[in-house]
Amino acid sequence: MNIVSKLNPLLTLEYMQTESENKYFDRKSGQIRVAELAPHISAFANADGGTLVIGISDKKRTLEGINSCGGEKINEFINAPKDCCRPMPRYREEFIDITNESGKPDRILLLHIEPSIDQVIRTSNDRTYLRIGDKSKEMLGENLRNLEYAKGSRHFEDEINQNASPDDLDQELLDKYKKRIGAEGVDTHQVLTARGFLQSREGKEYLTNAAVLLFAKNIMKFNMNCRIRFIRVDGREMQVGANYNVVKDKSIDEPILRLVDDAKAFIADQLRVFTRQEHGSGRFVESPEYPEFPWFEGIINAVAHRDYAASGQFIKVSMYDDRLEIESPGRFPNIVTADNISYTRFSRNKTISRVMTEFEWVRELNEGVKKIYADMAAAGLPAPEYVETPNTVKLILRNNIDKRTAHRNKDSDKASHEALNEALNEALNEDEKIIIKLIKIDPRISQESISEKSGFSRSKVQRIMKKLSVNNMIYREGPKKNGHWRVIG
């Protein structure tokens, strides 16, 4: 028998007992003090929501159940969000019948904490927490102020879209999503409602903007900003006018669940592969312009965390000879900055980020950004750069094209040198070639010695060398007595 939450099909009993705790899920023993739940409730509510499972040991992961706690404490567990937090977050409780570790019928309690959209949720002792990865961390100082500021407005993704109906959603994408969360046999309407994509307002049901952004059949009908634009520049800076040097300009307009894969496939085809000959072995080896993970993770983060309410703005990927830039609308969300991005995570778009996590695109524990840094370093490339402008965040990945093409430059120089020699050689008559050859053999040779070795008269040697000098084919370097001749080419 498959034991599973009715409110969140992803939470099977096996998942709750064996899966590592993460951004959306935490387990607690029934022996925990009720007040100790408060930080986790605050943390889930201030982040993207999540579920507290009570009755499974968080250390041994054994099925303890909660019946032995007694009715009074179980009621205290149920009322913990109301009694231990200010203001009370929205939540739902759910009991699931199990067989405990002693083989007896028992229950576990699930507290499904919903994200707080427009207010900070504090514990009753006025402390504030945020769920970051698998930890509930207290927010203090500037981090707390940023969180308070961010909670001052409703998230665009949670607002209803009065122009869209369930018929405007792509059933193929919905089926993929249902499979991802283990809800293949569940009615689509039920899934949309349970996950907050379908909401009631004054007796009518409306899709949220998140539902449209993720699943729409025709995203351009509802949101012109759900786009990735790729620009390939021939050079290191973009030129205008007669020197305009954009060689490719491609827009990818799809709902998020197609946008990511389509962008990955297209951009992968645009990136270059460098071939070089290994020193020693002589084998030719190929290396990519950039490791795949850094640029793809950069796109994932842009899609997950961009500001979708920003009118007329889209994600822009610009490829130059020496770098790749991924620019996302909106500034860093909440407590994230350019300095702490490698170890701090916060979602501007909580619902979208959660779905992308379920599709295994968004990494938990902030390992994605850490791996961007690690993979660039492992490839011998400069560290990634994050730049925040008044309206965007830009990730810059630099390649080492100068180093990688050094051998080509040398080959080119060698070829040019050989071509110059050949051209000069063709321009010389036989007498001039003889004198050039003697100078190459001995740059310090005198005109008298040239006359002796060539058999030419002294005046003929002088006349030929003067012509060669005038035509910039030879020149004298150093003092008249101890100097030497140089041959051009």
Image: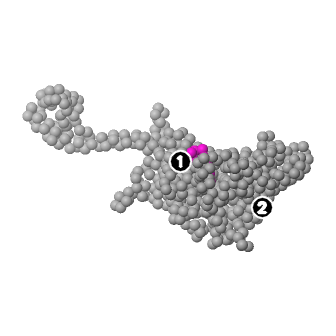
Q: Residue at the location (23% across, 32% down)? A: 440
Where are the magenta residues, as a range? Answer: 340-347
Image location of residue 473, percent across then percent down = 20, 40
Q: Residue at the location (63% across, 46% down)? A: 140
The numbered dot on residue 229 is none
Q: Residue at the location (87% across, 51% down)? A: 72
Q: For the residue marked with disc 2, what is the amino acid?
A: Gly
Count neighbours of disc 2 (C-alpha within 10 A) and say few if under 14, some if 14 to 19, many if 20 or more.
Answer: few
Residue 342, magenta (yes or no)? yes
Residue at mark 2 = 185
In front of the other: 459 or 375: 375
Q: For the residue marked with disc 1, what is the amino acid?
A: Ala
Residue at the right extreme of this rendering? 104
- Mark nearest the camera among 1 and 2 is 1
Picture quarter containing residue 447? top left
- Determine if residue 3 is in view: no
Picture quarter containing residue 2? bottom right
Residue at the front extreme of this rendering? 125
What separation in Å lies between label 1 and label 2 (alpha carbons)?
43 Å
Q: Is residue 14 left or right of residue 368?
A: right
Count neighbours of disc 1 (C-alpha within 10 A) and say few if under 14, some if 14 to 19, many if 20 or more.
Answer: some
Q: Secondary structure at mark 1?
A: loop
In front of the other: 24 or 201: 201
N-terminal label among 1 and 2: 2
Residue 256, magenta (yes or no)? no
- Determine if residue 341 is in view: yes
Image location of residue 86, percent across then percent down = 72, 55
Q: Is residue 318 left or right of residue 243?
A: right
Query: With respect to residue 271, does 196 lie above or below?
Result: below
Residue at mark 1 = 338
